[in-house]
Image (tube, helix red, strand yellow):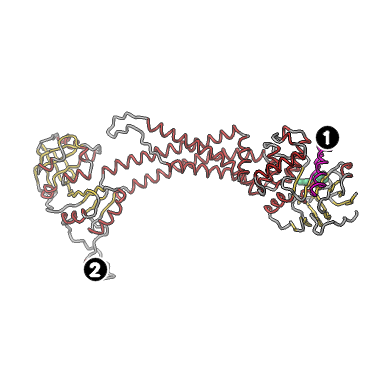
Amino acid sequence: MILLLRIAATHVRNRLRQTVVSTLGVALGVGFSVAMASLMEGSQRDFMATLIEAIPHVEILDEQRAPRDQPASLKYDAVVFHGLRPKEDLRGIRNPTEALASLRDWVGGMLAPRLSGQAVLRYSGQDIGLTLIGVVPRRELAVSKIGEDMRLGSFNDLDTTSNGLVIGDKAASRLGADLGDTVTLTSANGVAKRFKIVGLFHTGITTSDEGLAYAPLKAVQILLEKPDIINSISIHLNRIKDANEVAARAERQLGYKAVSWEEANEGLMEAFFVRNVIMYTVVGAILVVAGFGIYNIVSTIVHEKAKDIAILKSLGFPEGDIQRIFVLEGLVIGVLGAIAGSCLGFALSSYLATVKFELTTDVEMTRLPIHFSVYHYVIACLLALFSSAIAGLLPARKAARLNPVDIIRGAT
Amino acid sequence: MSAAPQPKADTPLLEVSGLTRILPAVVPVTLVKDVTFTVGESEFVAITGPSGSGKSSLLYLLGLLDRPTKGEVRIGGSPTHDLSSAEMAHLRLEKLGFVFQFHFLLPEFTALDNVLIPMQRLGKLSRKAQEEHARGLLADLGLEAFLHRRPEQLSGGQRQRVAVARALANSPDLILADEPTGSLDSAATEQVFESLQKIVERQGTTVIAVTHDLELAARMARRIHLVDGMVDFDRRS
Ligand SMILES: Nc1ncnc2c1ncn2[C@@H]1O[C@H](COP(=O)(O)OP(=O)(O)O)[C@@H](O)[C@H]1O
Ligand SMILES: [Mg+2]
């Protein structure tokens, strides 16, 4: 094999210019692939990190995954009832204290109970509808980023002010209300209660800033006439990887639907997957193009070296050896290109990582998020080697099949 | 046509019987027709005949570079017609050596490398022994000063002697030469011829050489004359 490699290297070395050009082709392919992959994975990770901080890792909801069995179907086996309406059900997680305590036993993370419902906020003759979330402030701060989004006042004041209210800055400006003002909230059942604005938040998400309000859990339970009931538990895990497991176990234990952040963002995960597929398709396409360069040079060598092929065959080199020599020639270029491309890719992504952007929008991205991973290099290099092996194989098979007698006759 | 002489050894080195090669075409071309002869160890055989009489074609068949349409070639008593191409290649590597009219050296390798390559492929000797053997072969042929020259830096006679050294690399039983002196001047012809003669006399290797030089043919122990792809006569001098 060393001998074959030596012969291959000699052929390649003697066509230096073409070799350099096709090596550059592979190197550019690998280099840009690596840079693109590190940028794409970097932005994906950046986005995920932001997302994971902002949303609960597991959320237990007051729903069942399957609709409830009707009493009749429990009693009779093969009977189908039409037109039955389920009994009016006072939704919500009953015995929240007990549920929370049983979860706290084994869940590694923070738990926050919530009761949310619709309410109308009235101030100086104007109404807006919003989603009112009853929270235990201490716990809510541990599972969400609302604390960081506060612009005025303090989320913790909900703890000390039993009728405190935190609303979005957009809602406040629509109503003309300000910190310290007293507003009226009315539930769907017509219960009204006065609240005092103790804080304003700004998340950057308009629907939240216009349509969300936080109040102490007790106050919301009274307003919505759901004493001692909550309708969700948010969990912020210490180890995010456990999310699916924790969700499944919590669901088995409590009988309520528990959704992990991955399940909740399934569409997003699919989008990322599709994005990666597209990326590697592009990478593959680049390397196929680089493969054409290799095919071209190896074909040329096979053509020019027909006499040498005949010599080697007459000396007793079997067809397999001849094929290997020319596959190796493709691989030599592929390996050189992969090495040069890895260096280029590293240089390119290192440079991109230092580029700074001055953006004045709310979502600030001061730097391109570059993620360095050895996998990007391994995948790009493997694809490059695969492509160069195929590109070498096609002319190599032709070389192996050359009939030495034809060539020897032709040369004399 | 005269009868082939009986070989000296019990198992002849090379047995050819009814060898025929027809090129399939709209009008098939018969290159070699019903050739039968036997060659023993340490023979020096000339193959002569007019141009186009099938001398080269016969040599390619003997050297397992081509397959006959009919008949067979036995080497060391073993038939070769049912060998795979890889097995044939191995037999060429181990038992046969070729010298062609034009040198057919690998242009990018030095004289020494050209001789080393078949040894390295066979891999029977240690690296050191290979190197020693190759240097010895080239020195025997008066080429010790040209070990590191590439073919383009050598004269025609020197190249052809490198080709002879390469044919000897794996100590073959049989060397097949197709007009080895065909493109050389008389001085170089003499050198190459003498080197082949020495191989037969000193090492007992059999050499079959195609030549159109009847003076040279007369200096060889046996001459097989072809006409139209058939053996016209086969006689010892
Ligand atoms: N591929 C081929 N197609 C047609 N004719 C061929 C081919 N190869 C050889 N021949 C013919 O076969 C004959 C024998 O050729 P060759 O063995 O080279 O003769 P020699 O070596 O005695 O000059 C010649 O007439 C040659 O023209
Ligand atoms: Mg000829």
Residue A162 image offset from top left, x and y in percent: 9, 44
Magenta span includes A270:
no
Tag 1, which chain? Answer: B
Crowd band around label 1 with a 10 angstrom C-alpha radius: few (<14), some (14–19), many (20+): few
Q: Residues within 10 Å of mark 2 (few under 14, many from 20)?
A: few
Asked whether residue A319 is in view, the answer is yes
Q: Which mark is residue B185?
A: 1
| Image quadrant where residue A38 sits | top left
Q: What amino acid type should be assigned to the residue bearing mark 1?
A: Asp
Instruction: Say what secondary structure mark 2 lies in.
Output: helix
Count of numbered labels shown in the rendering: 2
In this view, the residue in front, A337 or A172, is A337
The boundaries of the magenta stretch are B177-204
Q: Position of residue B86 (x, y in %)?
A: 67, 52
Q: Main secondary structure of the magenta part?
A: helix
Task: Answer left or right for A203 relative to B55.
Answer: left
Return the x and y of residue A243 as percentages of the image width and height.
Answer: 29, 51
* Image quadrant where one finds the C terminus of chain A: top right
Q: Is residue A271 above or below residue B4?
A: above
Residue B25 visible here: no
Quarter of the image for residue A331 reads top right
A359, above or below B40, in the image: above
Nearer the observer: mark 1 or 2; the answer is 1
Q: Which residue is mark 2?
A: A74
When the figure is inspected, residue B97 is found, relative to residue A372, above or below; the finding is below
Tag 1, which secondary structure? loop
Picture coordinates of residue A235, whole percent (x, y): 23, 49
The residues bearing labels 1 and 2 have C-alpha atoms spaced at a distance of 110 Å
